[in-house]
Image (spheres, rainbow, N blue to C red):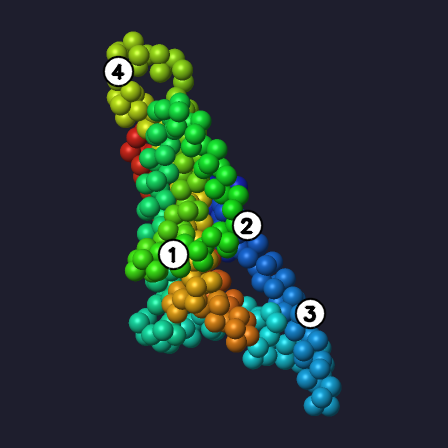
Amino acid sequence: MSEIAEPGGGVGYAPRVWVQRIFAGQTGPVLVVVAALILVWYAGAIYLNAPQQIDRDRRAGIERSFIDFAAATYAQERPVLPAPHQVAAEIWKTTVEVKPTSKRSLVYHGWVTLASTLTGFGIGTLLGIVLAIGIVSSRTLDKSLMPWIITSQTIPILAIAPMIVVVLGSLDVPPIWAKGTVSAYLAFFPVAVGMVKGLRSPDPMLLDLMRTYSASPTQTMAKLRLPAAMPFLFASLKVAIAISLVGAIVGEMPTGARAGLGARLLSGSYYGQTVQIWSALLVAAFMAAILVTIVGIADRMVLRRMGVKA
């Protein structure tokens, strides 16, 4: 059977050919960047943890070689900047070595944050789409709502997140909805702006054609504007799902929440557990990457179903 290689890639199974294939796609460049970041991270750990280690060695009267000194900076219990392997060990310990239902588990805390994220993402997406349809359909709403939508994003989320959570908490609203409201506050904006752009993207000639067919505004919206807005919608959803996660974490931090990645970050800062902070940050970043990937897969599936080339 003949084999078709990617442009720039080789043919065969020799190691050199495998390397050519990896670097012909995106995998090789991504791995190189990750390796460079890890090297910079290790170098930064030595630099930032050095003063603390020098002080300890001076008090203990210990003289070390550079290799032993570097190894000591990578083994501190509370380093200023933990080394990558320390963070990896913490993630392994808190995800694999403990039960997922344990409050020490990052799986448990990640699930709490994920639930709020998806709640806020759903609310924000629905609100953004409804606002965009209203803005495009009504000139009055366009003039009255759009400035307020833009102005709403100039208020720092850290300033209003505690108020939202506290006010909704006083009304006995469950925490997942309170934190979801913070996420929705961030998520609705890119969806609304992207959808407005997408709903206005059809060619004027196509809109004239719909008028010649005596199509109602609802038919024009359903058969022309909404399909044309799909690429804009999914591009906005990728941004919205990522900032929904940020909103959920922010909603957990200033309100004394006991569960969630935000609470994990807060407790780590209280007790100086930088390894715990970095492990929660990396898990949050990994979770955001997974969520954006899922939205990207849905994007390709929907657009392929519509016959649009992604």
The answer to whether residue 216 is above or below residue 192 is: above
Q: Which residue is mark 4?
A: 215
Whole-number angstrom distance, CA of label 2 to CA of label 4: 50 Å
303, above or below 84, in the image: above
State the CA–CA distance, disc 4 to disc 3.
68 Å
Confirm or deny contact between disc 3 and disc 2 (CB under 8 A): no
Identify the image quadrant of residue 232: top left
Residue at the limit of the structure toward the top, as seen here: 212
Which of pointers 4 and 1 indicates the residue nearer the eye?
Answer: 1
Regarding mark 2 in the picture, which secondary structure is present there?
Answer: helix
The kind of residue tagged 1 is Val
> How far separated are the C-alphas under marks 2 and 1?
48 Å
Mark 3 or mark 1: name the one nearer the start of the chain: 3
Give the amino acid type for the residue marked by disc 2 in the picture: Pro
Label 2 vs 1, first from the N-terminus: 2
Per the image, the residue denoted by label 2 is: 29
Q: Do we see residue 279 in this rendering?
A: no
Residue plotted at (50% across, 55% down): 158
Of the residues under marks 3 and 2, which one precedes in the sequence? 2
Q: Position of residue 76 (x, y in %)?
A: 59, 79
Give the residue furthest to the bottom: 61
Query: Which of the two discs, 4 and 1, labels the residue nearer the N terminus?
Result: 1
Q: Residue at 40%, 66% (x, y): give it.
A: 257
